Image (cartoon, grey):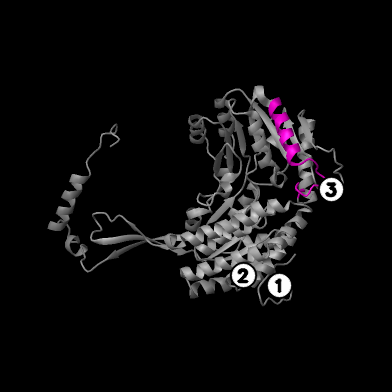
Amino acid sequence: MTALAYSADHTDDESPQPEERLMRLLTAQQAACRADPMPDRATRIRRLDLLHNALLDNRERLIAAVSTDFSNRAAAETELAEILPVLESIAYYRKRSRRFMKSRRRHAGLTLMPARVEIRYQPLGVVGIVVPWNFPIMLALSPLVGALAAGNRAMLKVSEFAPATGDLLGQIIAGLYAEDEVTVVTGGVEVATAFTKLPFDHLVFTGSTEVGKIVMRAAAENLTPVTLELGGKSPAIIHEDFPIDEAARRIAFGKGINAGQVCIAPDYVLCPRAHVRAFCDAFAAAFRKNYPTLRDNADYTAIINDEQKHRLEECLDDARIGGATLIALNPADDELQDTRKMPMILALDTTDEMMVRREEIFGPILPIIAYDSLEEAIGYINDRPRPLALYYFDWDKGRAETVLNRTHSGGACINDTMSQAVADDIPFGGVGASGMGHYHGEEGFRTFSKAKGVVRKGRIDPISFIGPPWNNLAFRAVKAVQKLRFRRRRISDPN
């Protein structure tokens, strides 16, 4: 599948090689960056406002395109999880861009005085964004908003597994921006591979850990900095004092969104051993209330394609063969064989050797793992790769602080799931196996900017007084001051 780029005046080339077509697009954007390396605030706001209006004007078309790609996805999910967060992000940066763009004063040490020291935030240049299929609007436009707010230009590679949404985004973007401002590229694995090899000034990739390693290797050839959002196995811990029905209800809501096809969905539950059965019953009741039927229920999302459905079925077969107890939640006992919808599955008695415990699930399967003490639950998490999200259910703030301080995760949420991803003013990003780097909030603006350190000197040049030949009066005076300032410290003294 060859690369296809959209622009307002796009004309199809004679089947160019992906590398050639992509390099021409990048070269055009790089030239535009050189012509306007530091766009003013008005230019940045104009680009954000264009996107804001386009989202409002094309809201229904985007919702329909996503549902087409999934064969069914609830309009409310697309509205709340994809369109609204991008609108909120635009509003966030629009309000704060003036402050974020300002240079910041920093301390000038004795050896630099008199001088002014500051940090200037300069656009990196051209940002490449590789978009996954699970949230093909939000995960395309959210990093784009941060990149544009920071003054960059961008190229987006949309997912071939969400073609209707990708094509529509391409058309919309082409109607808003010149090709050397923002452009959308479509295509399969060949195009994606060529895209990640381009010498971008920054590359954002959202996807699996294994593919993330390949992307990082490709970017390393050009020393391109990367932001990797890789998911992982995000745990939900329920403390024994927390109401089990309430925990089940909140976890069922988060796991039900997009049928679990979310990088920060609860991947497994660590439940007090005595409450496992009660949790399963309460989760089933909450799921039944949210989705009384599955087959013809427009509120319940299908699996994106046959390949992903087959992968999930393999996970279930592997667990069943290994002796796990699988509880299928299909409230109306709908026939689903000829659809891409799957019931929600609670998996009990799983072991570390099973795929559902080893691999990110990314679908409607939820292992329930019993634990006997909070210390054991914390140890279980810390013995495994660091997740993108961690969820802890406990009204006790002291215990919550303990869990937050003693575990590592990209983000965390206390007494809820997934809310941290839509909080505009905090960074979103992974750690270790779940990724690196951040976007969202002020950290997103900084990610897409070069923090350039600048020292400004005036008419008085102290070097002329203290420079060679050394041991002059001014140099001896500096040494004397330093001797007074920097004395050996008592190691036990924190002050």
At mark 1, the secondary structure is: loop
Q: Amino acid at mark 1?
A: Pro
Q: Residue at x 53, y 64 (%)?
A: 148
Regarding residue 224, the answer to whether it shows in the image is no
The three-letter amino acid code for the residue at tag 2 is Met
**Of the image marks 2 and 1, the number of the one nearer the N terminus:** 1
Locate residue 267 relative to residue 463 in the image: left or right: right
- Bin the neighbour count of mark 1 within 10 Å (Cα to Cα): few under 14, some 14-19, many 20 and up: few
Does the image show residue 400?
yes
Residue 236 vs residue 191, the one in the foreground = 236
Residue 23 image label: 2
Q: Which label's residue is closer to the chain start, 3 or 1? A: 1
Quarter containing the C terminus: top left
Image mark for residue 131: none
Is residue 49 covered in magenta?
no
Give the Cα separation between the discs numbered 2 and 1.
11 Å
Residue pointed to by mark 1: 16
Viewer-nearest residue: 345 or 221: 345
The x, y position of residue 184, in whole percent, is: 65, 66
**Mark 3 or mark 2: whose residue is earlier in sequence:** 2
Q: Mark 3 — residue?
A: 339
